[in-house]
Image (cartoon, grey):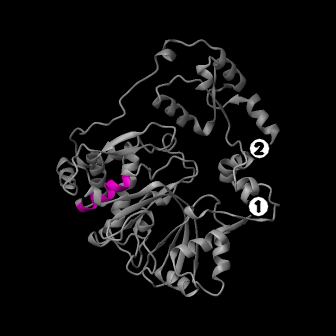
Amino acid sequence: MALEQQGVPTVAIHTDAFARLAKSTARANGMPTTRQAYVPQPLVDRSPEQLRAYIEGPDPVNKKPFMQILLESLTGELDDNDRKGLTFERDTPRFLEPDTEDNLRQLFMDNYWTDFMPIVLPTEERVEAMLKGTSHPRDKVVGRLSPTNFREDWEFTVEKVAVNAVMAGCKPEYLPVVLAMTSCGMTSLSSSTTSFAGIAVVNGPIRRELGMNTGIGVMGPYDHASVTIGRAWNLASRNLQGGSTPGDTYMGSLGNWYAVASCFAENEEASPWTPLHTQYGFKREESAVTTFRGGRYMQSGFGPRVEWQNKFRAAFAATAPRMSPLIVMDPIVARGLIEKGLTTKDAFIDWCVENAQQRAADYWNDQWVQTLVHPLAVAGVEPWATNLKAAPNDMLKMFSKDEINVVVTGGETQGNWRIYEGKRMKNNTVSIDKWR
């Protein structure tokens, strides 16, 4: 854009796997005739000879020699369509035309408005009943969502969240939780090729009010509230951000099963440590939800047993550096760690910071470190500048203290702990009470 503003013609170059996405993004931004050229996928770990063959060969999308497309795009005159651009409404109709239940369900599936499981059709009567779960007016703006940071944000209201809560099978009293989750501005269905998904943790009295499970099977399909609230967040993310359609607004190569209903509650009553939301300014008697982006890796263990320290170190070393860990543990584990001298959650997190380490060679070879951290190190930003000078076998710390979160939950049938990727974005611990 900056080059074009200076009068320098440009052409966007993509790999062919992203052709549909590139074209739809250009259209969504009002530039449907943007000049684009394509080379084959992948680019990573290709030899110079293979990459040169991409350039000297055909454009796999435009079906002409790549260099011909490039030169024609740079030198061709703009026509009326180029100058006109495109504008359109970023909104959806409030009502659909009446039809049979079977036809409406099929319409929802054909348009990717569902997760392809049975939905409760959001009739006007059902949405009205759902809206009784909050004191806020139906037209109040809840927030904005987009599948990626290069697409426009879509604004949505209380009523639109209620529609998705109905579809998910929620009860009206669940609506404040869904409103809080969607208000944080983080989609649970990121379009990243790395297949991020959202994870939500509920704290405070509302867990008991809604009958959320915090015991045996807490992270499984064993209570109505957790499952339908998590599903509502995912459906809302799909429908209130402009879509989540494979090849268009969703590009996660493998996908992620956390994108079905990833919501659970902390077992505050059985935990010997302070609950998650109190770390972020809330009181125990307040209800809040924290949303995390991640869900791409999981490591697990038991204990703390005799070799618990080495097991944790090995688990951390197998995770992705700079991709924040969300540590979920049974109350048995937390009590066992107290017996080992880690009397507070803060003390345990400090131990993790010191012991989550990786060989420098492995650390700097990580994709995300190369993309996000290496440029900072080269620019002289500490501590990465110093870490960049480390010998290949030197051990480097993987995480800072503010990147690690701990949740205690579960039914105390096994001293099990798991480490998930879960990055808490800024201000993503949100009050539920304000949405009652």
Q: What stretch is highlighted in magenta?
A: 173-182
Residue 388, position in %: x, y? 77, 54
- Residue identified by numbered label 2: 46
- Residue identified by numbered label 1: 360
For residue 7, above or below residue 206: above
Q: In this view, does 304 lie to the left or right of 126?
A: right
Question: Where the C terminus falls, by quadrant?
Answer: bottom left
Q: Which residue is drawn at 42% across and 70% down?
A: 220
Q: Does residue 233 appear in this view?
A: yes
Q: Which amino acid does label 2 sit on?
A: Arg
Mark 2 surroundings: few (<14), some (14-19) or many (≥20) residues within 10 A: few
Residue 194, position in %: x, y? 58, 51
Q: Residue at x 26, y 70 (%)?
A: 209
Q: Is residue 420 left or right of residue 134?
A: right
Mark 1 surroundings: few (<14), some (14-19) or many (≥20) residues within 10 A: many
Question: Where the N terminus falls, by quadrant?
Answer: top right
Q: Nearer the viewer, residue 200 or 26?
A: 200
Quadrant position of residue 427: bottom left
Q: Disc 1 versus disc 2: distance between alpha carbons? A: 24 Å
Q: Which of 56 and 332 is in front in this view?
A: 332
Q: Which residue is drawn at 44% across and 45% down?
A: 244
Q: Which residue is drawn at 22% across and 58% down?
A: 133
Q: In this view, does 412 lie to the left or right of 128?
A: right
- SS category of the residue bearing label 1: helix
For residue 53, above or below residue 259: above
